[in-house]
Amino acid sequence: MTPTPHSVPGRARGALLAGAVGDALGWPYERPSHDLPAGHRDAAGFFGWRRTTDRFRPFTEEVAPGEYSDDTQLTIAVARARLAAGPEWAAWLERVELPFLSCYESGAGATVKRACRSWASGRPPWAAAPKDRARYFAGGANGVAMRVAPHAIAHHAEDGFAELARDVVRDGATTHGHPRALVGALVQAYALWSSLRRPAPLGYGWLVDTVLDGSSEWGAPVWQGLPEPWAEQADRELPGGYGEAWRATVAETEEFLRAARKELAEGAAGAPAPFLARSGLTARDSRGSGTLCAVAAAYLAARSASAPDRALRIPVRMRGADTDTLAAMTGTLLGAGLGQEWLGALGRTVQDSVLLARLAEELAAGPSGEPGGAVPPPEAPVSPADFAERLAGCGAGDSVRLPDGRTAEVLSTAPERGGAWQAVCTRVRTADGQSLRFRHSLRKAPAAPAGRSGGPPAAELRGAHLPVRSLGRVAAVLEELFGLYPAQRGGSWAAYGGLILTEAPPPAEEAPGRQEDRPEGSSPRAVAGDGRKDERPAEAPLRAVAGDGREPAQLRLSTADGSAALDRARASAWSEAVEETADGFIVRADPWLNVHVSCPARPRRRTSRS
């Protein structure tokens, strides 16, 4: 098979973006303990929610609409390793990406976190202490299958699957040792590779048939090419030897694929959820199986190519399933076959969409130049404690060098408390456009002084309110220039994660009939709910005016592509409200609010306005 002309870059973008969209849609439903807003079941898109990190150190995190979890974080790490180091990508993954991932991961499984800590200590997980080594070889979850898309995109033009299979298993062995994890990853990679190369249109059920027919390729004992110490230890850890465990895993995967094909043939009009539940996708001890999730993703993609958005929402709402990973894997397959257009606004507003699209294009383009050209080389390994000390000295607006060699701008830093622990949460945005959250400076919270019954009552920071004069105009600026949509909206307010914009009534001196303090060309703004309409058209340019003399508040944003953002702003209806600054530009969106855009790569300076 050969891909249709010019289809691969679009399909590559679709694979990474749809995977991130599925991840972001499914993550809120992964655990019953997640704190979801009222009406979330009726939400058509992303929404903000809260999660508790773990039961031992129960910090509460505000998760913004469209924010993704460790599934996409790992996918980006693999993509960066391939682009940064070329043929030496595996060493980069072990030495740079996985140790650094432990500093910022959001929801990674225990197997991945143990492997990251092991690589950070300079030791592969198959050579760890006996207890951790046994856990490594028992790890058969979907943590490898979720991150294979960069390999499939990089190998899309090859006629054979063997090289891709070797890369998938080499990557998978860095975190997981059980055949279910590695075979599941091979099934997902084979499905992705086939989808990227399949000419449109995609027929009903084709993907399950294709994967089942290719079992001799994805089921081959590729593990035999892993380092000899790995293979020797694997034989000792698994009863009957690793080869026998591999063959049994391939056989059970083929059986599940045959059941999926039978279900597709007999139940085209039926709901897929009962079949997936019967297969173990909602059982606590099997829902995260690498092989089960890979076949389930192929099954969902195979039955829903004509309605991909519906297919993406099936795993999201499956009670008891590993919702984020299953939705991410399904989305990746659908994106690989159909591109990105069907994602609509979700593809534009998912976290770090620009970075994901660029990584996909670079992977699809293949090697160019010397390895390492895309990413600066990392510094000497930095321990989490050393990096935390570096972060502790940073404030909002500062630049910080990360252990992987990138630079990032600190967006915010704030103290946190979770149970008996306290820490500092620092959010950054890297120069290439990735959003990261670090929790550092972790320590026990001080006990109450002697003689006191306790400290102040526990409180939780829920967000900030900013008043604006025209909520409609500010919302339009955020949407049309920056792709930011409110998670919730009322008549006079709009919530963007922890930030709530509220439309304030006009001050007394600007009541109807008094014009001297009003900006030129403006007209009275009605108080929400009083029945009057705003007489100034929404597309009218905004002036740099604060009619009541107050200093406008600043809403700070960051973008990886400053030139494109500035060009878009200057070509918009708000061009007269745009002002270039030393580190980006300002959009005077409202008399009470300026949107300050920081650009890691400063946009080119214009000598005149168009």
Image (cartoon, rainbow, N blue to C red):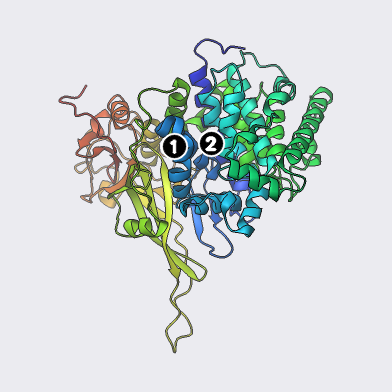
Is residue 78 rendered to the left or right of residue 507? right
Considering the image in quadrants, where does the N terminus appear?
top right
Identify which amino acid the numbered label 1 is placed on: Asp
Residue 564 visible to the viewer: yes
Quick check: 79 above or below 105? above
Identify which amino acid the numbered label 2 is placed on: Ala
The label on residue 352 is 1
Name the residue nearer the viewer: 253 or 284.
253
Quick check: 199 above or below 542? above
Quick check: 50 above or below 423? above
Q: Residue at x 51, y 59 (%)?
A: 60
Residue identifier under label 2: 20
Query: For the image shown, how many numbered marks are present on the structure?
Result: 2
Is residue 327 rendered to the left or right of residue 578? right
Q: Are marks 2 and 1 in contact (CB under 8 Å)?
A: yes
Q: Give the quadrant of residue 186.
A: top right
Q: Secondary structure at mark 1?
A: loop
**Residue 412 on image: x %, y %:** 35, 53
Instruction: Specify the farthest residue to the top.
Output: 5
**Residue 316 on image: x %, y %:** 65, 40
Instruction: Specify the farthest residue to the bottom.
Output: 451
Name the residue nearer the viewer: 520 or 218.
218
Instruction: Specify the farthest residue to the left.
Output: 607
Label 1 Cα crowd, 10 Å radius (few <14 / some 14-19 / many 20+): many
Q: Give the quadrant of residue 269.
A: top right
Considering the image in quadrants, where does the C terminus appear?
top left
